[in-house]
Image (cartoon, rainbow, N blue to C red):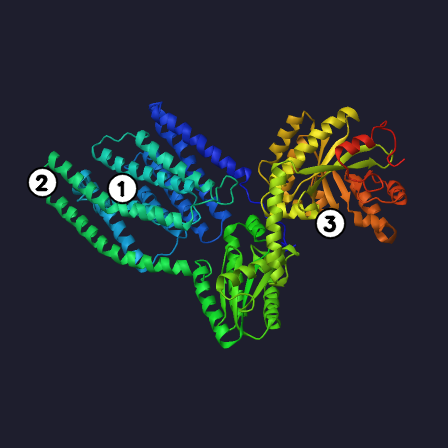
Amino acid sequence: MAVVRAKSQRQQGDSPHARTLFLALMLFTVTLTVWMLSGAPPAEHRHSLGYLLYLPVCALSAGLLLKAAKRLEHPGARGWLLLGAGVVCWGLGEATYGIIDAVWQLPVFPSPADLFYLSFFPLFMLGLFSFPREPLTRPQLVGFLLDVAIAVTVIANIIWHASELPATLAGNVDNPLAWVLSLAYPLSDLLLAAVLLVTALWRPRGLSRLQLLLLTAGTLMFLGADLAYGYLESKALYQEWGAVDVFWLWGLALFGWAGHLAPGSRHAKTAEPSPTQSRERARSLREMLPPTAILASFGAFLVLQMTGPRDTNFEAGLTAVVLLVLCRQVAGVFERQSLSADLFRRDRYDDLTGLPRRAALLTHLTQAIRGAQRDRHLVAVMYVDLDRMKHVNDWYGHAQGDVVIQAMAQRFGQLVRQGDLVARFGGDEFVVVLHNLTGAPDVRLIAERFLQSIAQPLTLNEDQLYLTASIGISMCPQDAGDAELALHNAYLAVEQAKQQGKNRIRFYEENLTQSLVHRGQLESHLRHALQHEGLSVHYQPLQQLSSGRIAGFEALIRWTSSTLGVVSPASIIPLAEERGLIIPLGEWVLERSLRQIKRWRESMHDEVYVSVNVSALQFSQAGFVATVEGMLADAQLPGSALMLELTESSLVENIESSTQTINALRNLGVRVALDDFGTGYSSLSYLRQLPVDVLKIDRSFVQSIDDGGKAFVRAITTLAHDLRLTVVVEGIEEREQLEMLAELGCDLGQGFLIGRPAQAAEIERHYDLPIEVLVGE
């Protein structure tokens, strides 16, 4: 196998403890909301009840945020840790406020509680800033800071003149501490609003849309509650445990909810917009910001002018906004120039590895081929395709898959000579251009070094990861006189290497083009046969070795084309998998087989079943179990009428997912057989983990039953029976083999001795006998 993990796969998922915390948070939040909106009764116990319900919300929200930090690694963990610390400080502020107010009955402003409240803001802002972001160029950064400055100036101007802050500061002029705190709260809110704007315009990586929405909504609720509290308190209208406190409450709840959805939770949505989508969305918001700021400022100016005396300070603030917008327009010119240069670079160089991309590769290769034609030397195009990278992404996630790609790019750069080129051509594909070669042996030597380097283990999440690659080589100018054809020929060669088993080197040959044309024709005929009933299903009997009774039939696809003649199943299945036909092909075989076994259950006996082979791709489809259930219902058959055969390799690629699917099939009554046992992984640990019903021993052990195969069959049969598995042996061609396998305790057998695969009509003619008659007599 191309990818091996030395340690057992880590299971990610939120613990029952985390789910309990989240449910408790929602319960306390909803309960407290209902209580506050109903007037917070009874009045004599309002303080104690309020804090009794409110402080657990703070603790639960902080707990979920801190658990999110524990699940992640730096730098994402630091963001969640700081957010959690901020909520802890807010909770300590509430506890201190409650003790001073309800227990000691002392003035609560100014007090030590303010120290905890104000600590919330820098910690929360640092937390939002700590999440990794895509780097900005210097012109982009200047424009971005101007955008934030415009928005902050507008908000500050409106808050200063629309609120009672000047009057509040004037009233506290004799109390320096109260004056400082009165100014600190709106300044903290203003800075938090700026950070929130930064988060919206410069989207952090690793946060899903829902998480970002929850953090944004929670922060807005905090800001709204702070502003409403300041205004109502200045008018002596604030009512404790009223509507304003509901906003603080739900802000805390939304923060905790976002932490609950952090990666590692089974509720987490790891999918997020691509960097390009994020940049486009942020650019749209930033383009709307200057005109929106101008409109908001002039709107506020007109409202204030109509409702009160002329305020020259507001006019100064409005002038500052206009000047900032003008500066932003100038900066936008430089930013667009930088963006144009950045787009050119992105078009020619890969963001992840820094290697040239297709456009730069074609330019370089075109010049290299011209030089080779002029100077009469050889240039090689080496197409390197990493094997089974899909499994790496499935097991570890795409972020860790990117780490693998970066590591491979670094290794490749160390293997080539000065003047050679390494380019990234696709997700897990690289192209290497080698100059000044004398012949194919030079290229093979370099290609072998690449395979050796790729085979070196790579540490990923403390696991040892082993990779292989397939390499296709095109020699220029003898194989191709232009860059596009050279790449195409190298691609044909690498495809041939993959078809031959991967982890190998293949040079381009002219017959590869002919083979590709043949496969294209074969695909066209297969599609036509699938659409026009040009395929057929043959059935091979499965016999109980102890009694000779026919237990069932294995369904085998056959294709006799009027143009191509008899096409081997060994050609049909790989082609169908490669060209995306395996799903409809598998469903066609399954539907046809169930329809046939329905008829035989009525004419033979009601326990006969059909065994159908299932490909790994078909088995891994999300709706596979539902498809099987629907087909059984359409055929009016119980699950016991069907057995599905899967190879070891298709099941062990993802043990957890395979186990879930097998259990779902068994709940329908469908049996699952492990096919060709002994030819793949043959790990007893896999056999114990997978809840299969049947073990099919490969025919190779029957053919060698007199040369060590007997001991293997006996051992596997004993183990299978200990695990309560049925043993089926394939490839029985001689009566001595049948008798020996029956003596060893094997349950079922199939092979040419018992019966060759045949069409349904021939099966019916052959078995037009009492069911007790032994096959072959």
Q: Residue furthest left?
A: 309
Of pointers 2 and 1, the one earlier in the residue sequence: 1
Residue that appears at 42% across and 41% down = 211
SS assignment at label 1: loop
Q: Nearer the viewer, residue 464 or 387?
A: 387
Bin the neighbour count of mark 3 within 10 Å (Cα to Cα): few under 14, some 14-19, many 20 and up.
Answer: few
Instruction: Specify whether 11 is left or right of 419.
Output: right
Residue that appears at 75% across and 31% down = 609
Q: Nearer the viewer, residue 417 or 726?
A: 417
Q: Which mark is residue 323?
A: none
Q: Which mark is residue 110?
A: 1
Snapshot quadrant of residue 662: top right
Determine contact: label 1, label 3, CB under 8 Å: no
Q: Amino acid at mark 2?
A: Arg
SS assignment at label 3: loop
Q: Amino acid at mark 3?
A: Ser
Residue that appears at 65% across and 48% down = 574
**Residue 250 appears in the figure:** yes
Snapshot quadrant of residue 576: top right
Instruction: Specify whether 660 is left or right of 434.
Output: right
Q: Nearer the viewer, mark 1 or mark 3?
A: 3
Q: Image quadrant for the C terminus?
A: top right
> Where residue 603 sits: x, y (%)?
78, 25
SS assignment at label 2: loop
**Residue 466 appears in the figure:** no
Q: Nearer the viewer, residue 721 or 329?
A: 329
Of pointers 3 and 2, the one earlier in the residue sequence: 2
Q: Which mark is residue 682?
A: 3
Q: Which residue is mark 2?
A: 310
> Where residue 29 sits: x, y (%)?
41, 31
Bin the neighbour count of mark 1 within 10 Å (Cα to Cα): few under 14, some 14-19, many 20 and up.
Answer: some
